[in-house]
Amino acid sequence: MARTALAKSQTAIERATAAPGESWASHFSAGRWAHHSGMILARLGDLGGSREHLQHALDVHGLDRRRSRAIVLGDLGDVHLRQGDLDGALTTWSEFITCADGVQSVKVTDALTDMRVRLSRYGKNSAVAELDGKAAALLGRA
C-alpha cells in the first residue's frame, strides 16, 4: 500500500504545475520527493530502494543548499550502515561532515549526534575515531 502511494505521489509531483495552491504536490520538487521516499522505504526495510532514492535526491536536490545536501547525506550514511556497509557509511558521513560544517540546523545537529551513537560500537576503528572527532568538533561549535 505504501509503495502504491509513493508511485501515485511521484506521478502527482511530476504533473503538478509550479503555481502555488493548484495541487498539494506543487511545493514538492523531484529531489525533495526522492528524499522523503527514500526515508519511507528505509522505514519499510527496503534499504536498497532507500539508497537509490537518497542517491537520486543528491543528484537533483540540495546541490545549492548545503543544509539540504547535508541532511540527505546524513540519512544516506545511516542506510549504508544499516546495510552493513561501514566503508560506504564512513565515506558518506565524511562528505556529510564537510557539507555540514558551518550549517546551523537542528536536523544537522541531530544527524551528527545520531551518527556518533551509531558509530560508537566501532570505536577501535581508526577511521571511525577520526570521523567521530570531526563530528564532536562540529557539535562543540553548534
Image: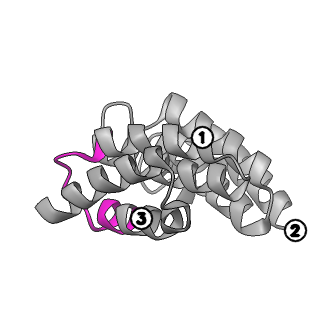
Residue beneath label 1, please?
Answer: 87
Q: Callout 2, which amino acid?
A: Met
- Magenta highlight range: 99-111
Q: Secondary structure at mark 2?
A: loop
Distance from the alpha carbon under mark 1 to that under mark 2: 33 Å
Which label's residue is closer to the chain start, 2 or 3?
Answer: 2
Residue at the image position 85 percent from the left and 59 percent from the top: 4
Q: Which residue is mark 2?
A: 1
Residue 122 position by quadrant: bottom right
Q: Give the mark nearest the N terminus, 3 or 1.
A: 1
In front of the other: 41 or 142: 142
Which residue type carries mark 1? Answer: Asp
- What whole-number distance in Å separates the C-alpha atoms at marks 2 and 3? 34 Å
Q: Residue at x 61, y 35 (%)?
A: 56
Mark 3 element type: helix
In the picture, measured across the screen, residue 116 lies left or right of residue 6, that is left
Front-most of 103 and 131? 131
Percent across and percent down for residue 77 are 54, 49
Camera-side mark, 2 or 3: 3
10 Å neighbourhood of mark 3: few (<14), some, or many (≥20)? Answer: some
Amino acid type for the residue under numbered disc 3:
Arg
Relative side of 17 to 68, left or right: right
Residue 53, visible in the rendered structure: yes
Q: Are marks 2 and 3 in contact (CB under 8 Å)?
A: no
Q: Is 55 placed above or below 73 here? A: above
Screen quadrant of the C terminus: bottom left
Q: Is residue 78 above or below residue 88?
A: below
Which residue matches tag 3? 116
Residue 23 seen in the current view: no
Q: Position of residue 96 (x, y in %)?
A: 39, 44
The secondary structure that dominates the magenta segment is helix
